[in-house]
Image (spheres, helix red, strand yellow):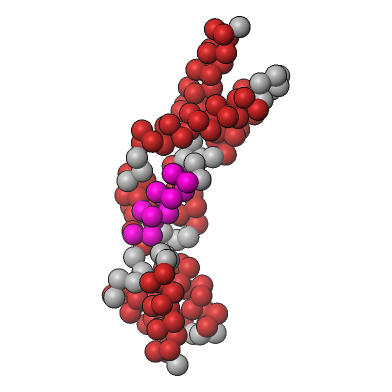
Amino acid sequence: MLEKITDKMRRMCSRREYCTHDIRKKLNVHLEGKSEDVQKVIDILVKERYVDDLRYASAYARDKSSISGWGPTKIRYMLSSKGISKDIIAQAIEEIDSPKAQLRLDKLMENKFRALKDDPQCRLKMLRFGLGRGYDYEEVACVIDKLISKRNEEV
């Protein structure tokens, strides 16, 4: 039975990236919480490189940054919630392409700025939006200031 579940996990891990935390949750369901068996299967999957937290964290950070437009703070938080160590998270965050991430932030904030053009609380809402996406306060404030000054020049 353990071999059958291990094969199932191998097939599952060959289709997409999983972290140790996700596999442990799935195995707890299949093995009804038998922690010794769960750890055996995880050890096998890690040894055979089906599960690699660094590879998972790097892929997660790249995808969330490029596709979802998340900033490093939100990515760091979400990865730590999956039980990934801080040094692995730091390596994954370093792999994010900073110039592209800055362009994405500029574009996101520009779109939000257009949507809030006549709102008296525009700056506050944009700050909240940028921080919610996981970007640093300084980055977000700088982009907002550029957008506001650009709008004031046009008027």
Q: Is residue 54 visible?
A: yes
The residue nearer to you, when weighing 57 against 111, is 111
Find residue 4 and report its horizontal and vertical position in percent. 43, 89
19, above or below 93, in the image: below
Residue drawn where x is 47% and y is 73% of the image: 24
Residue 60 lies in the magenta-colored region: yes
* Left or right of 83, for residue 110: right
Q: Quadrant of residue 36?
A: bottom left
Find residue 37 and report its horizontal and vertical position in percent. 43, 85
Residue drawn where x is 36% and y is 62% of the image: 53
* Left or right of 86, for residue 132: right
Residue drawn where x is 36% and y is 36% of the image: 98
Find residue 125 and report its horizontal and vertical position in percent. 64, 29
- In this figure, what is the number of numbered marks? 0
Residue 80 lies in the magenta-colored region: no
| Magenta segment main secondary structure | helix
The residue nearer to you, when weighing 2 against 33, is 2
Residue drawn where x is 43% and y is 31% of the image: 103
Q: Is residue 136 visible?
A: no
77, above or below 25, in the image: above
Seen from this angle, which residue lies furthest bottom? 1
Q: Which residues are magenta?
A: 55-67
Find residue 148 and report its horizontal and vertical position in percent. 56, 16
Quadrant location of the C terminus in the rendered image: top right
* Left or right of 128, for residue 77: left
Quadrant location of the N terminus in the rendered image: bottom left
